[in-house]
Amino acid sequence: MLPEQQEFELTIVDVSRSGPGVARDPDGRVVFVPGTAPGDRVRVRVSKVEKRFVEAELLEVIAPSLERVAPRCRVFGKCGGCQWQHLDYSLQWRTKVSGALHALSRVGIRADGLPRDEFPASDPWSYRNRIQLRGGSFGVGFYSRGSHQVVPIDRCEIAREELNAALPSNRDEAIRRDASSKLELEVSESGEVSATWNSGHAAQGFRQIHDAQNALLQGWIAEKVNPGRVLLDLYGGSGNLSLGLSCRFDRVHSVDIGAGRLLGRLGGDVLPANVKFHSSDVGKWASRNRSIESSAGGACIIDPPREGCGEALPAICGLLDESSITQLFAVGCDPDSWARDVSRLVSKGWRLECLAFFDFFPQTIHFESVACLVRV
Ligand SMILES: C[S@@+](CC[C@H](N)C(=O)[O-])C[C@H]1O[C@@H](n2cnc3c(N)ncnc32)[C@H](O)[C@@H]1O
């Protein structure tokens, strides 16, 4: 058994969907090494020994893999934001797709043979329309990996250029304020940058952070959805995925815990008369409104936060049964909780028809998965 702090050499053979490169130690046990690429010959130091795996930190790349690329960012490896700037983008994308299929297989769903659409990002840089920074006498920065220490930055390679252009003046403001502060910078759809100090996450309401990929996701659902009487948009935010479909349904219900605040995003836009927003917890709303669209038929979009639907799922299924909804789009940004929700839906009588994967977060391990299900 390798003791902690021991240093040794190994060859990385794979990359795990959670980020680190994967190798075997001399005893055949799995070793995870962050910041490595398959094919790298590296020197590492053991940082944690568990029964079935070892974690090690990278000390030196002795011979680099052909899949290794030069990270663009000066603070890559220190900043907690990106995990994969050292990997060729095509490898990042392959790892995400195989990771989603692996997550499905772990809950008993063989999806390799199903129709699947893949949407890697056409430009894997300069895409984020919103960043959250920490400010203080050092200027502005991001939390480092796994800690609340701040890594100062003067640019972010995955942020939109409008946000990078706004960094110097906000850095000056952070220094002027001196005390530790939280700053959210966002570029609106019309290109204006806003700065929000010391407010909660997504202070101006949730918005997908990659506009081009969001348009692809909207387009994919629009292409697949069958028109009907009712569309339910659960965890609907400000109607991002349903407003554009409202002309294909008699009625749309969009349910989100922050619907009131999120509607501010729509500004003066006039909502279609057949769209109703409900500001509520989805589970509670589904239990209380089980008969709201009795036997109406139609489609449903479910796009929960990272942790998935959790305890709300039985109430959601009850609502879907009562309303005779026949088509379902399950969207998720965490492959494990998404796969768990999909398998629970399958066990409740839904059949998985096709899949789509969208890279909303290049250079990181995150992405969006969508399953289209139909009632058996
Ligand atoms: C991943 S976002 C999706 C938003 C929207 N579908 C979109 O594309 O912009 C998840 C949404 O779930 C909402 N949310 C989180 N927990 C909730 C709950 N228990 N009940 C209702 N909405 C919730 C958040 O406010 C957020 O808008």
Image (cartoon, rainbow, N blue to C red):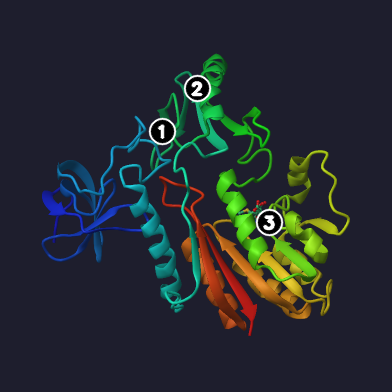
Q: Amino acid at mark 2?
A: Gly
User: Which label sits in the foreground, 2 or 3?
Assistant: 3
Vertical position of residue 73 compared to residue 262: above or below = above
Vertical position of residue 155 compared to residue 248: above or below = above
Q: Amino acid at mark 3?
A: Leu
Q: Position of residue 45 (x, y in %)?
A: 17, 47
Of the 4 image quadrants, the one containing the N terminus is bottom left
User: Which label sits in the foreground, 3 or 1?
Assistant: 3
Q: Position of residue 296 (x, y in %)?
A: 82, 76
Q: Quickly name the residue at label 3.
A: 241
Label whose residue precedes the other's in the sequence (2 or 1):
2
Q: Quadrant of ligand 1?
A: bottom right
The residue closer to the viewer here, 204 or 40, is: 40
Ligand 1 contact, mark 3 (Cβ < 8 Å): yes
Q: Within the image, what quadrant is residue 184 found in?
A: top right
Q: Amino acid at mark 1?
A: Gln
Q: Quickly name the residue at label 1.
A: 149
Q: Position of residue 236 (x, y in %)?
A: 70, 56
Q: Is residue 327 visible?
A: yes
Name the residue rendered at 20%, 55% in the picture.
Answer: 12
Name the residue rendered at 52%, 16% in the picture.
Answer: 175
Q: Do tag 2 and tag 1 residues touch (Cβ < 8 Å)?
A: no
Calculate the distance from the C-alpha at mark 2 to the C-alpha at mark 3: 37 Å
The residue closer to the viewer here, 169 or 191, is: 191
Name the residue rendered at 73%, 50% in the picture.
Answer: 238
Q: Secondary structure at mark 3?
A: loop
Calculate the distance from the C-alpha at mark 3 to the C-alpha at mark 1: 36 Å
Q: Secondary structure at mark 2?
A: strand
